[in-house]
Image (spheres, rainbow, N blue to C red):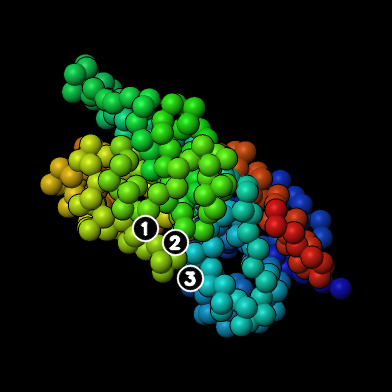
Amino acid sequence: MSKPVVLVAEELSPAGIELLASDFDVRHVDGADRAALLPAVADVDALIVRSATKVNAEVFEHARKLRVVARAGVGLDNVDVEAATKAGVMVVNAPTSNIVTAAEHAIALLLATARNVPQAHSALKQGEWKRSKYTGVELQGKTVGVLGLGRIGVLVAQRLAAFDMEVVAYDPYVQAARAAQLGVRLVTLDELLRESDFITVHLPKTPETIGLIGDKELHQVKPSVRIVNAARGGIVDENALDLALKEGRVAAVGLDVFSSEPCTDSPLFHHDNVVVTPHLGASTHEAQEKAGTQVARSVRLALAGEFVPDA
Ligand code: NAD
Ligand code: MLT
């Protein structure tokens, strides 16, 4: 009997592949290349993706044997879960695999915006010793507003509390008692915008959160605010952010994610006070290993018709 087919559409850790290779026919395709992906899904039982593969109704129409889509990471915004359900396809992810890595990256961006590390680095490598130009600000005693107090937001809050920051958060789905336990004060979005010296975004991308930080909100912030988005592009509206930077209503920005990816050019790149990384939030060896092995285990269970626990 032929082995069930698992199609890996983006990079997966060798440990994840190894967990699958003995029992499944593991194939590879570039999931971002639609012309290659659609014929490749025709006879597969499982599809493994990260964030670059759009898994929508069109994919399910081509994938008549598909039983499970596995997302090697957290965000499911590139998978149409409703269309999957209609097609009878299970969707699994690796919700805890990269949360520490993502939290650490958000803090790296936050520190970079506070101390101009990338700008000073580039200048010095070009032979410019500019100390006063790159004077920064301390974190101690400042207020950080965490948007979304979920798995990653909590890790960020705990770590920034260790810098002696006051942590406030906006998350209508979190109990005040839970926030208090963490030493976090829950506030309204307006209060967060008005009070924060730093804002860090840890929301899922949903119809509710797209553009949540737009022109109106960016008129409420302190002009000294530094904003970090290592969650999903578009939650902070890019045009509104560009305008706020041009008008000096925001002091600095750190971005790991963009409304359209890959993003190799953006008006935001032209501001010296914008620090960017190419969606590196989950990119550590540890997180990729965990994501690969967690989804491989989930795929094995799903194809065996067994219960798949929330990892
Ligand atoms: P999570 O689901 O654990 O937490 C999200 C939190 O947002 C929840 O507490 C929820 O109550 C809150 N929330 C949802 N809708 C809201 C709204 N409208 N207003 C206010 N709060 C709202 O998710 P997580 O694991 O912490 O991930 C957070 C984000 O980080 C996701 O977008 C995920 O895709 C992204 N992420 C990015 C990277 C990266 O590489 N940059 C890596 C991992 C995760
Ligand atoms: C995630 O949601 O897990 C991250 O954005 C990282 C990735 O795309 O793998």
Q: Which of marks 2 and 1 is nearer the N terminus?
A: 2
The span from disc 3 to disc 1 (Cα, nearest Å) is 26 Å
Q: In this view, does 28 lie above or below 223?
A: below
Residue 41 or 112: which is nearer the viewer? 112
Q: What element carries label 3?
A: helix
Residue 183 or 289: which is nearer the viewer? 183
The span from disc 2 to disc 1 (Cα, nearest Å) is 7 Å
Give the residue type at disc 2. Answer: Lys
Q: Name the residue under label 2.
A: 205
Q: Is mark 1 on a helix, strand or loop?
A: loop
Q: Residue at x 58, y 53 (%)?
A: 73
Image coords of residue 195 (percent x, y):
30, 42
Quadrant in which residue 285 is drawn: top right
Image coords of residue 227 (percent x, y):
32, 43
Q: Earlier in the sequence, mark 3 or mark 2?
A: 3
* Side of 22 where 165 appears, left or right: left
Callout 2: 10 Å neighbours few (<14), some, many (20+)? some
Q: Mark 3 points at which residue?
A: 34
Whether residue 197 is visible, yes or no, is yes
In this view, the residue farthest toward the left is 247
Callout 1: 10 Å neighbours few (<14), some, many (20+)? many
